[in-house]
Image (tube, rainbow, N blue to C red):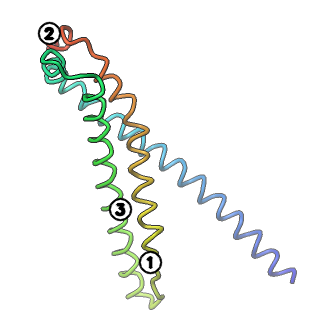
């Protein structure tokens, strides 16, 4: 009984550490997405200015960059799940440990990665949507 209790405590401690590691990884990944999107907005400043000068609304530009961030992280999530499943099967083949893949959890993980992209893509998207068209067209 005492040994089972110690194993449970060890398992809980390990889970807490894994949660911290995953949280830090998500934060770093989100900041990476934000940086990529900020570079994209900076490189496409003239394009944004031209769109705004031709009548594009803030909402349209905002949705364009949010969609870009969502697709970027969606693809990253799909590639990550695929790599994880492939690695699980490789390890299973080497160590003869059975593999159990949960499709619903995999879908939740991909959708969560997309949500991270939307959240961290919001600042660059707002920056793009709030650009002054005259200043954007003058940008070098």
- Numbered circles on residues, count: 3
Count residues near mark 2 (Cα–Cα under 10 Å), then give few for <14, some for 14-19, many for 20+: few
Q: Earlier in the sequence, mark 2 or mark 3?
A: 3
Q: Position of residue 94 (x, y in %)?
A: 39, 87
Outermost residue on the right side: it is 2
Between 15 and 72, the residue placed more toward the observer is 72
Task: Verify CB contact (< 8 Å) between mark 2 and mark 1.
Answer: no
The Cα atoms of the two marked residues, 3 and 1, are separated by 14 Å
Left or right of residue 140: residue 83: right
Q: Residue at x 66, y 58 (%)?
A: 16
Q: Which residue is mark 2?
A: 138
Under circle 1, the secondary element is loop
Left or right of residue 26: residue 126: left
Between 15 and 137, the residue placed more toward the observer is 137
Q: Position of residue 78 (x, y in %)?
A: 32, 61
Q: Quadrant of residue 89?
A: bottom left
Q: Earlier in the sequence, mark 3 or mark 1?
A: 3
Q: Which residue is mark 1?
A: 101
Quadrant of the frame with the N terminus: bottom right
Q: Name above or below for residue 71 compared with residue 103.
A: above
Under circle 3, the secondary element is helix
Q: Quadrant of residue 58?
A: top left
The Cα atoms of the two marked residues, 2 and 1, are separated by 53 Å
The Cα atoms of the two marked residues, 2 and 3, are separated by 40 Å
Task: Verify CB contact (< 8 Å) between mark 3 and mark 1.
Answer: no
Q: Earlier in the sequence, mark 2 or mark 1?
A: 1
Which of the labelled discs sits on residue 80, or is there none?
3
Q: Position of residue 92 (x, y in %)?
A: 42, 85
């Amino acid at each position: 009984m005492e040994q089972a209790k110690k194993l449970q405590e060890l398992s809980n401690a390990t889970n807490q550490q894994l949660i911290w590691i995953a949280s830090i990884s998500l934060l770093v990944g989100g900041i990476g997405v934000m940086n990529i999107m900020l570079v994209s907005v900076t490189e496409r400043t003239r394009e944004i200015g031209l769109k705004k000068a031709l009548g594009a609304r803030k909402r349209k530009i905002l949705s364009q960059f949010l969609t870009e961030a969502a697709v970027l992280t969606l693809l990253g999530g799909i590639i990550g799940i695929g790599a994880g499943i492939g690695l699980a099967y490789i390890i299973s083949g080497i160590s003869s440990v059975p593999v159990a893949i949960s499709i619903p959890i995999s879908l939740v993980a991909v959708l969560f990665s997309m949500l991270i992209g939307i959240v961290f893509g919001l600042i660059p998207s707002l920056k793009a949507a709030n650009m002054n068209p005259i200043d954007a067209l003058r940008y070098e």
